[in-house]
Image: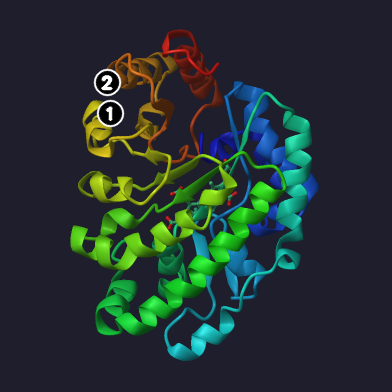
């Protein structure tokens, strides 16, 4: 359950008030934060405590994650000269992350898999180019249409770093990988096919020999599901905008999702009703991994999430438990 940790009092107590990047830089803290939601909820997999901008922070691009806001870049990517600031990532740059993975897999043992992750190239590039969270994506859309050659050169760098980052996580024991293309839904289908899909395909192709399951996820991607499904991931993540049965039809492969996180803001009974709706749409076929359709909303009551996990375990189609 993505960002399940951030609604927990034990997370806030451990993490303090600084940038999340400080907590991620400390393997002892990062490993503990990764394990907290697993202990509390008994979910079937852990997701690494990291962020999609971590590899770009590690190679010195000058990105910070501002509490309550998200990733902010001091000098955003704007011209060919900025390519120089995106040198190749090395394993030495990310020893804090691999040390966290080492600790987590020991603690989890053989029963609970660790999901490693990275941002998909378009979503990561949107932060590097825009410089801060955006609703319009005006700077990156202007770049892709006005200077596609520079845009492609940027994507080449992002692909290379993303592959290095993900392969290192598997080398240290992650047993599945998720690519978050959270903002792909801001693109038209033509734009997705030209400016996002090829780079995502290249990342997934470069992971194929690792033989770990991969999950490709985006928000507001109902119109893109068929194209995303052809990128080469094992599983497609879907948010809550598309009914699960229709999402499965479009994906044509296993799916993960799709409970609306906002349905977890009321009572436990209301959230359980919402979870049952997802299970109903999932039907009895295998190939659905229950999850939220996006991250946990920070002020979600942990007891409500615990009730959702319980109803899925008790009433969902078993299979892998
Ligand atoms: O449970 C966990 O802790 C999982 C770790 C995790 C993951 C999977 C974090 C820690 N970030 C992410 C991925 C991430 N980061 C995505 C993709 C998933 C998604 O769409 O939610 C994105 C888009 C980001 C960028 C980001 N980082 C934002 C979004 C800003 C925007 O554009 O709207 C924010 C707010 C952050 C900060 C962040 N990263 C992670 C946490 C727990 C937080 C928030 C709280 C904090 O600062 O402690």
* Residue 114, label in figure: none
**Which residue was labeled with disc 2?**
281
Residue 285 x, y percent position in the rendering: 33, 17
Q: Residue furthest front?
A: 209
The residue under label 1 is 244
Dots 1, 2 in contact, CB < 8 A: yes
Q: Quadrant of the C terminus?
A: top right
Q: Secondary structure at mark 2?
A: helix
Q: Residue at x 54, y 62 (%)?
A: 162
Which of the two residues, 256 or 70, is positioned nearer the viewer here? 256
Instruction: Report whether the residue tagged 1 is closer than 8 Å to ligand 1.
Output: no
Residue located at (46% from left, 41% from top): 295
Q: Is residue 169 left or right of residue 202?
A: right
Q: Secondary structure at mark 1?
A: helix
Residue 170: image location, x then y, percent = 65, 47
Residue at point 59%, 47% (across, down): 210
């Amino acid at each position: 359950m993505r960002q399940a940790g951030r609604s927990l009092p034990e997370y806030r107590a451990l993490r303090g008030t600084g940038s999340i990047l400080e907590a991620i830089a400390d393997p002892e803290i990062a490993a503990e934060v990764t394990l907290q939601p697993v202990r509390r909820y008994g979910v079937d997999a852990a997701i690494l405590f990291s962020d999609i901008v971590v590899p770009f922070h590690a190679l010195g691009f000058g990105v910070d994650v501002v509490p309550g806001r998200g990733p902010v870049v001091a000098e955003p990517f704007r011209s060919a000269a900025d390519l120089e600031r995106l040198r190749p990532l090395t394993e030495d740059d990310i020893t804090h992350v691999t040390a966290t993975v080492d600790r987590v897999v020991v603690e989890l043992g053989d029963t609970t898999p660790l999901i490693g992750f990275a941002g998909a190239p378009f979503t990561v590039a949107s932060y590097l180019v825009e410089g801060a969270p955006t609703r319009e994506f005006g700077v990156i859309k202007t770049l892709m249409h006005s200077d596609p050659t520079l845009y492609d050169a940027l994507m080449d760098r992002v692909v290379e770093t993303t592959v290095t980052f993900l392969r290192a996580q598997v080398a240290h024991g992650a047993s599945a990988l998720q690519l978050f293309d959270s903002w792909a839904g801001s693109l038209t289908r033509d734009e997705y096919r030209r400016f996002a899909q090829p780079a995502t395909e290249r990342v997934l192709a470069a992971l194929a020999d690792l033989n770990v399951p991969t999950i490709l996820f985006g928000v507001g991607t109902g119109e893109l599901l068929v194209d995303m499904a052809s990128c080469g991931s094992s599983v497609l993540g879907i948010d809550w905008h598309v009914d699960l049965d229709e999402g499965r039809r479009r994906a044509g492969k296993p799916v993960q999702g799709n409970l609306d996180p906002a349905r977890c803001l009321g009572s436990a009974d209301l959230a359980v009703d919402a979870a049952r709706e997802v299970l109903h749409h999932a039907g009895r076929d295998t190939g659905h991994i229950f999850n939220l359709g996006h991250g946990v909303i920070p002020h979600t009551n942990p007891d409500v999430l615990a009730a959702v996990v319980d109803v899925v375990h008790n009433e969902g189609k078993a299979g892998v438990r």
